[in-house]
Image (spheres, rainbow, N blue to C red):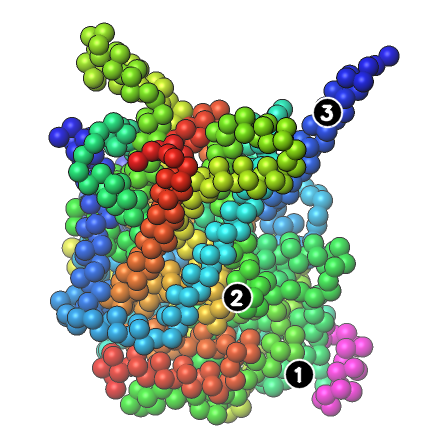
Amino acid sequence: MTPFLLLLPAILTMLFVVALPLIFSFYTSMTSYRLTRPETIEDFIWFRNYIRLFENPDFWRAFLRTIVFLAIALNAELLLGLGIALLINKITWGQRTLRTIMMFPMMFSPILVGFQFKFIFNDNIGILNNALQSLGLTTQAIPWLVDAKLAMFSIIFAEVWMSTSVFAILLLAGLFAMPRDPIEAAKVDGCNSWQVFRHITLPFLMPFVFIAMTIRSLDVARAYDIVAIMTGGGPAGRTELLWTMIARVGYDNARMGQANAMAYLSTILSIAFTYYFYTKLVAARRYMGGAE
Amino acid sequence: MKTSLKRLLACAAMPALLAGSAFAQDYGNFDGYTLRVKLIGGAQYEPLYATISEWEAATGATVQILSRKNHFELDREIKQDIAAGTLNWCVGSNHTSFAPQYGNIYADLNDLIAPETLAGFTPLLLEHSTVDGRLVQLPRHSDVSNLFYIKSLYEDAENQAAFAAEYGYDLAPPETWDQVRDQALFFANPPDFFGTQFVGKDEAITGRFYERLVSNGGAMFDEDWNPTFNSPEGVAALQWFVDLYNAGAVPVGVPNYLWDDTGLGFASGTVALNLDWGGWSAFFNDAENSSVAGNVGVVRAPKGDAGLRTGWSGSHSFSITTTCDNPEAAASFITFLTDHDRQMIEARMGILPTRTAVWDDALAEFAAAGDDFMVEVFSTFRTSMAEDAFTPPLIAEWIEVSNALWPRLQAAMVGDMTAQQALDAAARDAREIMEDAGHL
Amino acid sequence: MSTIAERAAIRRRIQAVGLWLATFLLMVIMCLPGLWVVLAAFRPNREILAKPPIWVPQQLTLNNFAKIFGFGSDQVGIPVLAYFTNSMVIAMTSTVIALVIGVGGGYAFARFRFRFKNGLFLGLMLFRAVPGIALSLPIFMLWSRIGLIDAQLGLIIVYVSLNVPFTIWLIDGFFRQIPISLSEAAQVDGCTRWQAFWKIEFPLARSGIAAAGVFAFLTSWNEFALASQLTRTTDSKTLPVGLMDFTAQFTIDWAGMCAMAVIIIVPALILTFLVQKHLISGLTFGGVKG
């Protein structure tokens, strides 16, 4: 019984804060519930909200865009984070200072990151365009937040800026845990540093990579704050992600039933991401001969 | 005892009040009552709230401000309150465009506020504040847009000669939207200088499109609530935005612009013509904030193809909930916040009043102070409030229709669709919304 | 005079300094967007928004901070102090509670065998993955029924649940690192299991707990989406929600917002620096060997 007693508070909070609201929102996703007409919560319409969603191309575009956004952002964060971790790992003196500097972006609230990059990417008075123009690299005002490709790039850039540190710190921890002997041995055997990295460091780091991926996938939806501030999903829906769509339909249009149906599908998407990385993690650990 | 102490403190803090010794009106006595309110926040709205303590002193009541946020945030919060049944407050800030969404949560002020008080307000604005025959809000201040321009550009002899040679008529502040297009193209020199600009997202672009639609002789809906904004008038209206955008006469980022971007853009001196709200005028002419201070002119909003001027208008207002436990106190409070002296405070900052008398008095005050710019602003805006102003359709679905429309307007602007395709697609979505709501 | 060995040592040192400088430079470039915000906090709006841009600050001032606190201006200040207190109380309390719950849960996963163990562990993680936007309205409805809207407690409960899963994960891994024999030896020596935990295992797990604490604190300190729905007034509004005070209907006060940003960042930075030493080792042992 002891383990369950110890786990009881954790289970209770999760049930209370997550499971209970999810049950409620599942129910409302099958009603025509409008925020401004409380009585509509009793208007049960089965799966009509879901059927409408399946027929709505805008929703599917946002759904796919969200997947692409996550895939690009997470991979970029991983690669950059890995590079930074490897670099800092080489530093012997003054490392603590560098580590703190490295974590600087983690101090920024997502909403602040949104405002910051909205301003940086502003076409007219933003510092990025001003810098490019001052350096003579362009005479144009580049429409960072408007052009179809650049707008996606800009929001991904902001997200990557905010979260790369998380990867770097987790991977750095992995490098610290790494035994020195195999590397020394490989060097004695004449391996160059690329070979050492490819055949020794990287396989050892893989579980850490999946840990980092899993941990990050837990709160990817944090990017909602950034996108909502920077572009609000526009222009012309070019940066519309599931989360901005849910917020607009649910609150501005007050169609909570429909919004909750979308929210349910986005929940499934998030859970799938986490589950995928978690199974990868378990497999990598087994491969490494870890526990379980 | 408590009241007299409060009054004493208030008087000590504000000796100026003593001169009048009491208000022109009796605000009643609500000793010990706590009035719970939700107000719109933001720099230009705060000075009015600084006077709330005067009402507290006069009535013995206490005001508890539960929320103070911008309107979009406040809108969310009020919708949540409706959903959760937590309308346990009395007075809320409101807006003519938002009000129809809230159903019957707000009381009919015709029952709560004396007819002689209401008589002081501009009749048209009270009409705009009425939803389904109920006066659900008392207008606090109103707004409409007129055309600001940089004077020196029009006084420059070289510009005048070059413009006349190219376009065949004299360079003067524009009378029609076609002239705005000519002049914007003439002045534009991207990326350093722009002919004009517009807001490009959310309800803001919907409103700008809507007023152009009306000025061209079109309408959002016909009498039976069928969407009709994809008419030739609508296409022409949208095409105007598309053309200026494609020609580079406006900043390339406008599809992501809101009011702050356009306001700051004009103040930065990089835009020749700027259709904007009256509330900005003092800012534009303030050397602390604006590099065009002293060089700003304003003319009435130009005319569209049908010879009508654009005049999308809305009023910020106060409403009283039907669940309020002391409607008399709430009515006294909002009467106080919209009375003559309170509106003068806001008018001095360039915010447009809703009481007829305040227009006269503010204009007289500006003239006496020799503030020619503010006299020009107030005379211009007074005319357009009286003759050009109109609201969006006052239906609950307005914001939802707007959310269906504006991404399509953007799509036409950035070239994903033609103007006709974009409006047809939006009209289909709008029809669905109107069907769902039971209008069709 | 110098020998070859000495010269090699010098070369190594130069290389090390060069590497450090290069890395430092890279880090600074990475931080530039954030540093720009910090710099803007000390500059007037007119200068930040100027076009053509003013690259070298001509005027550094504390006015933006003074304005926030309402000194020397006719405007009503922003209740930063209340926001700051709320943020501190909420972030600290929720972190401590999450750690207590997390230590219990992590210990249970590390030291006991029981049914549904793996399923339960995965379940906790998956619950955490539910997007905040999907939860915001249902939580709001629920909280309004039980009076937790605009209350510090309401946010604390939410943040505890945001942080418990990751805390459990880290601490579970950490306890596994500590040989079970230590605790068994102590019990042989007459300690109860509780005493053994408290005297032997808990102190060893300190850096794991510290690392989990930093992450939990940062999450609660910076959270916006849920806080903006669940708070209303100075009774519970936190600093990130307070940032929205700088956006009015028509304007955004950039300088003021940047000053506020500095107020938000500095405490988080100090805390992170203080816990730096434990952070890496905590993550190292907490993660992989689990």
User: Chief secondary structure of the magenta span?
Assistant: helix
Q: Position of residue C283 (x, y in %)?
A: 43, 31
What residue sits 57% from the left and 30% below the top? Answer: A183
Looking at this view, name the residue that lies furthest to the top.
C189
Using a 10 Å C-alpha cutoff, classify the residue at mark 2 as few (fewer than 14 neighbours), some (14 to 19) or many (20 or more).
many
Q: Is residue A129 visible?
A: yes
Badge 2 is on which residue? B256
Say which chain tag 2 marks.
Answer: B
Badge 3 is on which residue? C12
Q: Is residue B440 above or below residue B255?
A: below
Are the two marked residues, 3 and 2, in contact with CB atoms closer than 8 angstroms?
no
Looking at the rendered structure, the kind of residue marked 3 is: Arg
Which span is picked out in magenta? B153-169
Q: CA distance from mark 3 to mark 2?
A: 52 Å
In the foreground, A268 or B141: A268
Using a 10 Å C-alpha cutoff, classify the residue at mark 1 as few (fewer than 14 neighbours), some (14 to 19) or many (20 or more).
some
Badge 1 is on which residue? B182
Left or right for B226, reference B290:
left
Marks 3 and 1 share the same chain: no
Q: Can you tell which quarter of the image residue A50 is in?
A: bottom left
